[in-house]
Amino acid sequence: MSAYFPVLDGGLAKYLRDIRAFPVLEPEEEYMLAQRWVQHGDTGAAHRLVTSHLRLVAKIAMRYRHYGLPLAELIGEGNIGLMRAVKKFDPEKGFRLATYAIWWIKASLNEFVLGSWSLVKIGTLAAQKKLFFNLRRVKAKLDMIDHGDLSPGQVRQIALELDVPDRDVVAMDRRLSARDSSLNVPVGDSQLEMQDLVPDESDNQETVFARAEELGKGRALIHQAMEVLSERERAVFAARRLSDAPPTLDELGVRFGVSRERIRQIEAKAFEKVQAVVRAGFLPALPVS
């Protein structure tokens, strides 16, 4: 029973019931289990650390539902982030696993969402990622939800809040709004839904398979690329490039006890390493001119 790990194959409702059966650990017990895992590689201890935090993953994954992705997949990706957190957790740092794991869970979910939405269309700059993940929050804060297209004044207000160009706010808002449109809206008094009347203009199976294969390869390469980074490079790269609210160079400098310029250099070096791995993975597939 101790090695049991709930799976999503039995349905989301059953999974959510199952994970509630794992008790929340007291600080002393968590510390003891973490020490057993770090010092002795005790997989039983690691299992208890993971399962006791599955509810945390589900709670965070719920916040990503509005991106139109299956909740089961979001939870699965969040669980991967949790496992990474447990693997790297150091109980001697003095903070709880949940505090440390939240960052890894969000990073894994952010990467999954961005990959699913296609970074080519969204953009890869930190500011564009910040806009993608924070536009809804800012609109809600300014009471601009469900008001149709934003007015020029609203666009300017959001642009100033997130420090991005006005045109980026307009483009991202329209894209997110289009994604939100439901195809399950009933048509009149009939039993038809809007999706029943939409012509099928989807790509053929070969194109869909090729895109899925490329997306999967891209994710694998990113995971592979992260492994070549040092622990500090990985932390800086993830914070600056994968976070929904990237910290400033100054903030990271304070966290790591180095200068702002040193953080910039670490980020640039890490990006070069990741870029090299990704390019090396894709270039062999390109036709030779």
Image (cartoon, rainbow, N blue to C red):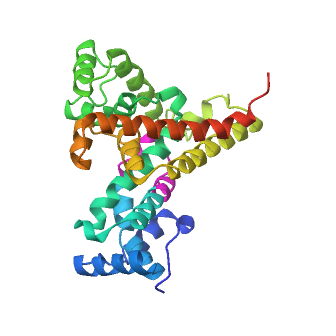
The residue lying toward the viewer, choosing from 90 and 76, is 90
The residue lying toward the viewer, choosing from 282 and 157, is 282
Q: Residue, x 34% and y 53% (percent of image)?
A: 103
Disc tally is: 0
Instruction: For the C terminus, give its image quadrant.
Output: top right
Q: Look at the image and say whether residue 184 sits in the magenta stretch.
A: no
Question: In the picture provided, is 132 more to the left or to the right than 163?
Answer: right
Q: Is residue 133 above or below residue 29?
A: above
| Residue 165 appears in the rendering | yes
Q: Residue, x 40% and y 45% (percent of image)?
A: 238
| Quarter of the rendering containing residue 198 | top right
Find residue 65 and report its horizontal and vertical position in percent. 41, 47
Q: Look at the image and say whether residue 73 sits in the magenta stretch.
A: yes
The residue range painted magenta reads 62-77
Find residue 142 and report its horizontal and vertical position in percent. 20, 30
Q: Residue furthest bottom?
A: 1
The residue lying toward the viewer, choosing from 130 and 191, is 130
Find residue 90 and report its horizontal and vertical position in percent. 33, 67
Find residue 46 and report its horizontal and vertical position in percent. 43, 75
